[in-house]
Amino acid sequence: MSSLKNMSLLPDNETPRNPASLLVQNYINTTAKEEEKRNEWDDLAAFERAVGTGILDIHESIVKNVGMLDAVGYKSDELVNAVATYEKDFTNIVHDLEVIGQQHEGKSGGAVSNEEYAKSIELFENYRQLDVTMRASFLPVCTTITESLLIARDNLIKQGFTPDNIEEKLNEVMAQEAVDPNVITDVVAK
């Protein structure tokens, strides 16, 4: 059997190395390159902003749509209950977002220890779970609001409005009411 050197897979001046040492060297090289690119804390801050933006986008939509329903005088027990539930959930979710954010406040770049790395993964999972919770909590409220908007639209059509002038009417009523975007009917968002 011929040696690796005789098979001309290696340059003439190089001797075959132990496969384990090749793996170790590869790991060292890969780890060094990965550490240069690591920025767990920056990635976590970006994810925090994305989750926070999602919460605010949904909140603004809910406030706007509930304001429209209020402006045209639509109210139902289901809508009142959905808004009350939403307000509690919103307050809790915003609080949880702040608590998670405080745990990595002021950190940037990459984790400098295994403990920090593990903490960054834990916090990422906390944000991911918060995002899932937010969507699960807000979806039923959004569905109730959408159904309420459809009923309110049908009621306006019965009053003689056309689909084309309903939006005009809503804008007119809301301008007169001067709907505060931070108020959900009688409940103030914090």
Image (spheres, helix red, strand yellow):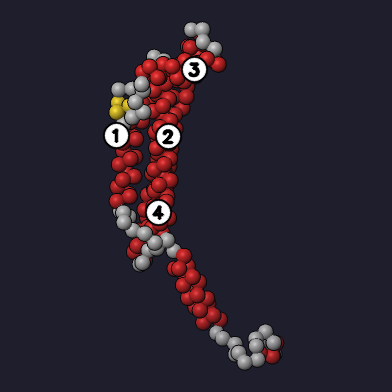
Dot 1 amino acid type: Lys
- Give the mark, 3 or 1, whose residue is nearer the N terminus: 3
- Dot 1 surroundings within 10 Å: few (below 14), some, or many (20 or more)? few
Which residue is rendered at x = 40% and y = 54% of the image? 44
Q: Is residue 182 above or below residue 131?
A: above
- Give the mark, 1 or 2, whose residue is nearer the N terminus: 2
Dot 3 amino acid type: Glu
Secondary structure under tag 1 reads loop
Q: CA distance from mark 4 to mark 3?
A: 43 Å
Residue 131 x %, y %:
41, 43
Q: CA distance from mark 1 to mark 2?
A: 15 Å
Q: CA distance from mark 3 to mark 1?
A: 30 Å
Residue 151 x %, y %:
48, 16
Residue 8 picture quarter: bottom right
Q: CA distance from mark 3 to mark 2?
A: 24 Å
Which residue is rendered at x = 39% and y = 37% of the image? 56
Q: Which mark is residue 44?
A: 4
- Give the mark, 3 or 2, whose residue is nearer the N terminus: 2
- Dot 4 surroundings within 10 Å: few (below 14), some, or many (20 or more)? many
In which quadrant is the C terminus drawn? top left
Q: Which mark is residue 58?
A: 2
- Dot 3 surroundings within 10 Å: few (below 14), some, or many (20 or more)? few
Where is mark 1, residue-wise? 190
- Give the mark, 1 or 4, whose residue is nearer the N terminus: 4
Dot 2 amino acid type: Ile
In which quadrant is the N terminus drawn? bottom right
Q: Nearer the viewer, residue 131 or 159?
A: 159
Secondary structure under tag 3 reads helix
Residue 28 x %, y %:
48, 75
Q: Which mark is residue 168?
A: 3
Can I make out residue 68 in this image?
A: yes
